[in-house]
Amino acid sequence: MSSKKKEQLKIKCVAYLSTDGDLYSTEKSENKQLRYLNDYAMAHGIDVCRVIRRNGMGQAMVNEHWKHMAQLIKKGFVDGVLIVNTEAVSVSVPDAFYKVGQIYEAGGVVVTVDEGKLGMSVRRMKEGRMVLVNERY
């Protein structure tokens, strides 16, 4: 595959850093997580355009960050969200589905290092035909 084709296949993503633990070690843990995400991104054709840090804040702040990332996708600045795993951003399985659904509704994709690209076989009408929400990827 030529390098030109590799460039075309890259998805622009927001890297969302979310770690648990005490506030004193949060920055160090998030920096490790960023290196981990960057390594995964380079190996899988993902371009990390922005980085958003949780900074040890609670679940309410994660929800606000998630809404902000969905807006970035709707506006066309990025194509998706890159996280380590869904446990880092959600408190339950329904919460994880809701957050992934928000990103898919915005037209983006959620990629996790541990679980891969998260899929939802949600369909909608587009130009008179039924398509998957994330058909462009």
Image (cartoon, grey):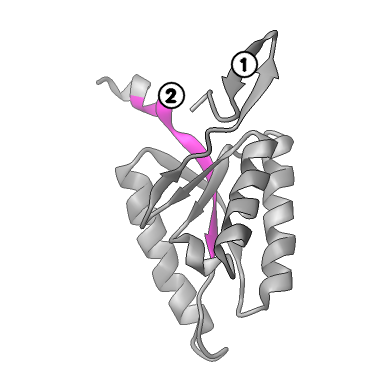
Does the magenta-highlighted stretch encompass residue 12?
yes
Separation of residues labelled 1 and 2 (CA atoms): 26 Å
Q: Is residue 20 visible?
A: yes
Callout 2: SS: helix
Question: N-terminal of the two: label 1 or label 2?
Answer: 2
Give the amino acid at mark 1: Met
> How many other residues sit within 10 Å of disc 1, few (<14), some (14-19) or many (≥20)?
few
Does the magenta-highlighted stretch encompass residue 110?
no
- Residue 49, given in percent of the width and then of the height, sits at 55, 46
* Residue 8 image label: 2
* Residue 130 image label: 1
Name the residue rendered at 60%, 29% in the picture.
Answer: 133
Quadrant in which the N terminus is drawn: top left
- Determine the image quadrant of residue 71: top right
Which of the two residues, 126 or 76, is positioned nearer the viewer here? 126
85 lies above or below 105: below
Callout 1: SS: strand
130 lies above or below 15: above
Q: Which residues fall within the magenta stretch?
A: 6-17
Name the residue rendered at 43%, 43% in the picture.
Answer: 117
Give the amino acid at mark 2: Gln
Which of the two marks, 1 or 2, is nearer to us in this view? 1
Name the residue rendered at 56%, 42% in the picture.
Answer: 80
- Residue 90, given in percent of the width and then of the height, sits at 58, 66
Which of the two residues, 99 or 33, is positioned nearer the viewer here? 99
Q: Is residue 77 visible?
A: no
